[in-house]
Image (tube, helix red, strand yellow):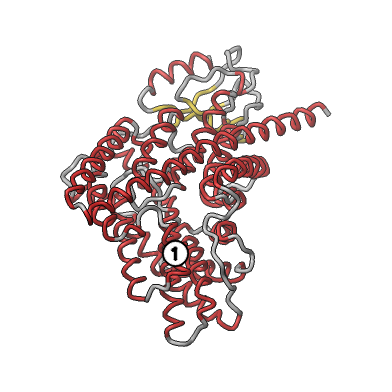
C-alpha cells in the first residue's frame, strides 16, 4: 500500500512538473514566434525599399552582415545551437550527448530570432523543440530529477515547444514519441501531453484560436484516389532527393566556402537580399506562401519556379549551420508539390478545381511523412494545423504511399541521420560532449542506500543505467542505489578525469 501511494505521489509530482514546463515553454516559444514575425515584417519593408531606392541595398547588407556576425559569435561560443536542434535533443534523450541548458537556451532564442526573422528559408519549429527541451532540462536540474525522470521532463519540454510553435498538442506529443524519443511508455506520453496542452493554451492566448495553416477545403472523393497514390509516389521520390541533398549540403559548404564554419551564415544572409526584393512572398519558413496557394491561382510554371527557389535556398539556409529548422520548409515544399500535381490535373480537365486545396494539404503531410519517416505525426500534425478532420483518409493514404516509396529507395529518418552526422563530427573533431564510464558502488560508500535524487551528482554527469547482477535498470529519481551496483554514467569529455575522480570518491 505504501509503495502504491509513493508511486501515485511520484506521478502527481512529475505531471505537475509537466504543467510548469508547458507554461514556461509556451511563454518562451510564444515570445520567440512573436519576435520572428515582427522582425520579418521589418526586414520585408527594408528589402522592399531597394526597388524604389537602390542605395538602400547598402543598409540591407549592413543589417544582414551584422546579424550574421552576432549569430556567428553565438555559434562559436555554443555549437549546440546549430541547425534545428532536433538531432541534439534526440541525442540527449538517447544518452549520446549532453549540454548545459541555460547557455543553449538563451543563445538559441536570440540566434533563432535573428536568423529566421531575417527572411531565410528556415523554420521555427526545430528551435522551438530545443528551447522547450532545455527548459525541461532546467526544471529537472532545479528539482533534482535524474535518469529516466530527467529524460521524461526533457521529452515533455520538446513536446511543449513544438505545440507552442504549431498549436498542435496531440501531434507534438506523438512527434516526440515517434521521432525523437522512440518510446511510448505511460510516463512519457502522459507528461508530454500535459506539457503540450499547457503550452498550447499559452500560445493560443497570444496568437488566437485559429489553426496555424487554416484553409477552406473540400475533401477528395474516393473515385479520385488514384491521384492520391500518384501524389504519394512523387512525394516519396522527391523526399528521398531532399534527404540526399540536405545531408550533404553541410559538407559542400566546408568544401567550397573559404570562411570558417561558424561564419558560413553570412552567405545566405547576403543572398536573401535579392530574393527579398524580387520574391518577398517566399521569405521565411513558408507559412505565408502555403496560405496564399489556395486563393492565388498560380499557373503551374510559377508553382514550379517557386518550388525550385524554395528548395535550393532552403538548402543554402540550413546548410550554413544557422539556428533554424527544416520542419516548416518541408511542409511548404510538400504543399507546392501537391499544388503542382493538383493544378496539372485540373488543367487536363481530369479534376474539378474544387479539390485543389486537398492536394496542398495532402502534399504537406506526404512529404513530411516521407522525409521524417513519421507518418502518424504527419497525419495528425496536418489535421491540427489545417483545422479539419475531413481529410484524414487522404492524409493517411498519401502518407503511407510516400513513406513506402521512400523506404524502397533506402531512405532513413532525416533527423536520426542528422544526429549520426553530428555525433561523427564531434568524435572526429574531439568535440564529443559526453563519454560513458562505469563505476561500482562499494559497501559503506556515500551512494550506498540512497535514492538517485539524494546523491549530489557532479555537474556534467548523467546516470543512464544500473547493472545489478544479471539485470539492467534504467534509473529514476526514486531508484535506491545498493552496494555492488555498477553504474553507467555519461560524463563531460572536457572534464572527464576530474569527474571520474569525484564519482569514485562518492562510490568508494
Q: Position of residue 470 (x, y in %)?
A: 61, 35
**Residue 380 visible from this viewpoint:** yes
Residue beneath disc 1: 292
Residue 352 % position (x, y)? 52, 82
Q: Residues within 10 Å of mark 1 (few under 14, many from 20)?
A: few
Quadrant where the N terminus lies? top right
Q: Is 308 placed left or right of 442 in the picture?
A: left
Residue 64 occupies quadrant: top left
What residue is at 31 percent from the left and 51 percent from the top? Answer: 317
Vertical comparison of 351 with 336: above or below: below
The percent position of residue 293, horizontal first and vertical second, equals 44, 67
Determine whether 124 is above or below 312 in the image: above
In front here: 314 or 433?
314
Query: Eyeballing the image, is 349 above or below 296?
Result: below
Q: Say which of 44 and 95 sits in front.
A: 44
**Which quadrant would residue 497 be assigned to in this image?**
top left
Q: Residue at x 41, y 67 (%)?
A: 336
Q: In x, y percent, where is residue 159?
A: 56, 44
- Horizontal placement of 126 versus 13: left or right? left
Observer-nearest of 400 and 111: 111
Amino acid at each position: 500500500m505504501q509503495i502504491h501511494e509513493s508511486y501515485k505521489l511520484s506521478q502527481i509530482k512529475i505531471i505537475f512538473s509537466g504543467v510548469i514546463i508547458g507554461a514556461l515553454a509556451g511563454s518562451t516559444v510564444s515570445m520567440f514566434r512573436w519576435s520572428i514575425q515582427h522582425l520579418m515584417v521589418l526586414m520585408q519593408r527594408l528589402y522592399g525599399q531597394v526597388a524604389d531606392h537602390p542605395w538602400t541595398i547598402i543598409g540591407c547588407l549592413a543589417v544582414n552582415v551584422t546579424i550574421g556576425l552576432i549569430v556567428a559569435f553565438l555559434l562559436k561560443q555554443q555549437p549546440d545551437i546549430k541547425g534545428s536542434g532536433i538531432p541534439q535533443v534526440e541525442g540527449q534523450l538517447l544518452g549520446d550527448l549532453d549540454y548545459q541548458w541555460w547557455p543553449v537556451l538563451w543563445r538559441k532564442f536570440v540566434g533563432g530570432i535573428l536568423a529566421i526573422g531575417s527572411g531565410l528559408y528556415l523554420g521555427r519549429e526545430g528551435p522551438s523543440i530545443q528551447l522547450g527541451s532545455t527548459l525541461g532540462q532546467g526544471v529537472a536540474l532545479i528539482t533534482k530529477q535524474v535518469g529516466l525522470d530527467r529524460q521524461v521532463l526533457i521529452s515533455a519540454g520538446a513536446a511543449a515547444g513544438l505545440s507552442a510553435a504549431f498549436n498542435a498538442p496531440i501531434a507534438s506529443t506523438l512527434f516526440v514519441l515517434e521521432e525523437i524519443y522512440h518510446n511510448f511508455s505511460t510516463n512519457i506520453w502522459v507528461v508530454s501531453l500535459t506539457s503540450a496542452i499547457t503550452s498550447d493554451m499559452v500560445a493560443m492566448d497570444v496568437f488566437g484560436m485559429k489553426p496555424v495553416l487554416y484553409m477552406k477545403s473540400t475533401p477528395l472523393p474516393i473515385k479520385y484516389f488514384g491521384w492520391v497514390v500518384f501524389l504519394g509516389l512523387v512525394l516519396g521520390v522527391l523526399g528521398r532527393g531532399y534527404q540526399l541533398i540536405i545531408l550533404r549540403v553541410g559538407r559542400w559548404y566546408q568544401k567550397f566556402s573559404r570562411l570558417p564554419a561558424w561564419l558560413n551564415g553570412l552567405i545566405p544572409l547576403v543572398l536573401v537580399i535579392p530574393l527579398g526584393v524580387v520574391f518577398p512572398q517566399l521569405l521565411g519558413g513558408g507559412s505565408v506562401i502555403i496560405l496564399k496557394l489556395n486563393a492565388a491561382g498560380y499557373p503551374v510554371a510559377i508553382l514550379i519556379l517557386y518550388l525550385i527557389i524554395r528548395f535550393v535556398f532552403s538548402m543554402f539556409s540550413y546548410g550554413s549551420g544557422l539556428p533554424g529548422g527544416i520542419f516548416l520548409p518541408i511542409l511548404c515544399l510538400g504543399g507546392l508539390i501537391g499544388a503542382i500535381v493538383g493544378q496539372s490535373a485540373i488543367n487536363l480537365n481530369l479534376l474539378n478545381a474544387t479539390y485543389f486545396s486537398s492536394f496542398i494539404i495532402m502534399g504537406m503531410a506526404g512529404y513530411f511523412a516521407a522525409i521524417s519517416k513519421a507518418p502518424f505525426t504527419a497525419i495528425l500534425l496536418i489535421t491540427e494545423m489545417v483545422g479539419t478532420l475531413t481529410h484524414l483518409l487522404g492524409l493517411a493514404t498519401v502518407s503511407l504511399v510516400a513513406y513506402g516509396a521512400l523506404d524502397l529507395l533506402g531512405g532513413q529518418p532525416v533527423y536520426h541521420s542528422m544526429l549520426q552526422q553530428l555525433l561523427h563530427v564531434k568524435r572526429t573533431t574531439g568535440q564529443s560532449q559526453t563519454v560513458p564510464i562505469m563505476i561500482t558502488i562499494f559497501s559503506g560508500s556515500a551512494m550506498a542506500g540512497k535514492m538517485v535524487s539524494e546523491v549530489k551528482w557532479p555537474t556534467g554527469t548523467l546516470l543512464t543505467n544500473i547493472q545489478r547482477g544479471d539485470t539492467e535498470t534504467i534509473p529514476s529519481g526514486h531508484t535506491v542505489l545498493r552496494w555492488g551496483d555498477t553504474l553507467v554514467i555519461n560524463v563531460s569529455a572536457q572534464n572527464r578525469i576530474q569527474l571520474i575522480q569525484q564519482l569514485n570518491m562518492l562510490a568508494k
